[in-house]
Amino acid sequence: MSTMQDSREATMIGRRSDGTLVRRPLSPHLQAYDMLQMTSALSISHRITGMIWTAGAVVMVWWLVAAASGPLAFANVQWFLSSFLGVLFLMGVTAAAWFHTLAGIRHLAWDAGWGYDIPTVYKTGRAVLLGTGVLTGLTWLMLLISW
């Protein structure tokens, strides 16, 4: 007879490189992470900004469909995007796009094996945050100048 209470426990047992048995968690969860650590905060933010960027792509498709549908539909979308909430949304999508892009470049560097030591992790994390702010500001400055 088995001593396991739950069949999922079989997936929780693993071996270290020296062969000793260890119990692994089923899945990491938000309570296991310190949200004030830069690594955790940027990882979670990278996922959230990916979802925000997707929402921005949906709005862009809405804008393109409205442009193809006719002047009235396009005017309605333009009215929303030029409103205070629309501009705030577009600024947020711009910041999310820059953050997600820069964090993605950081992940590509990690995939190449560079930047795993703690000082470099914090340095590149700060660079992602600073770059997001600077590039978002420059993007909107160029947009306002050309508007």
Image: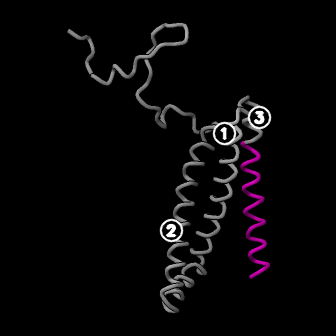
Query: With respect to residue 25, does 107 lie above or below?
Result: below
- Quadrant position of the C terminus in the picture: bottom right
Left or right: residue 127 versus residue 107 is right
Report the residue at 23% width, 11% height from top. Answer: 2
How many tags in the picture? 3
Q: Earlier in the sequence, mark 1 or mark 3?
A: 1
Give SS at disc 1: helix
Q: Amino acid at mark 3?
A: Thr
142 displayed left or right of 33 = right
Viewer-nearest residue: 104 or 36: 104
Q: Secondary structure at mark 2?
A: helix
Residue 6 at x, y percent in the picture: 27, 22
Q: Is residue 50 left or right of residue 12?
A: right
Q: Residue at x 62, y 58 (%)?
A: 96
Q: Which mark is residue 120?
A: 3
Crowd band around label 1 with a 10 angstrom C-alpha radius: few (<14), some (14–19), many (20+): some
Query: What's the amino acid at mark 1?
Result: Met
**Closer mark to the observer between disc 2 and disc 1:** 2
Query: Residue 75: x, y in percent?
Result: 54, 88
Q: Magenta region: which residues?
A: 125-147
* Element type at mark 3: helix
Question: Mark 2, residues whose alpha carbon is within 10 Å: few (<14), some, or many (≥20)?
Answer: few
Task: Tell me: residue 70, above or below residue 32.
Answer: below
The numbered disc on residue 38 is 1
Q: Disc 2 marks which residue?
A: 58
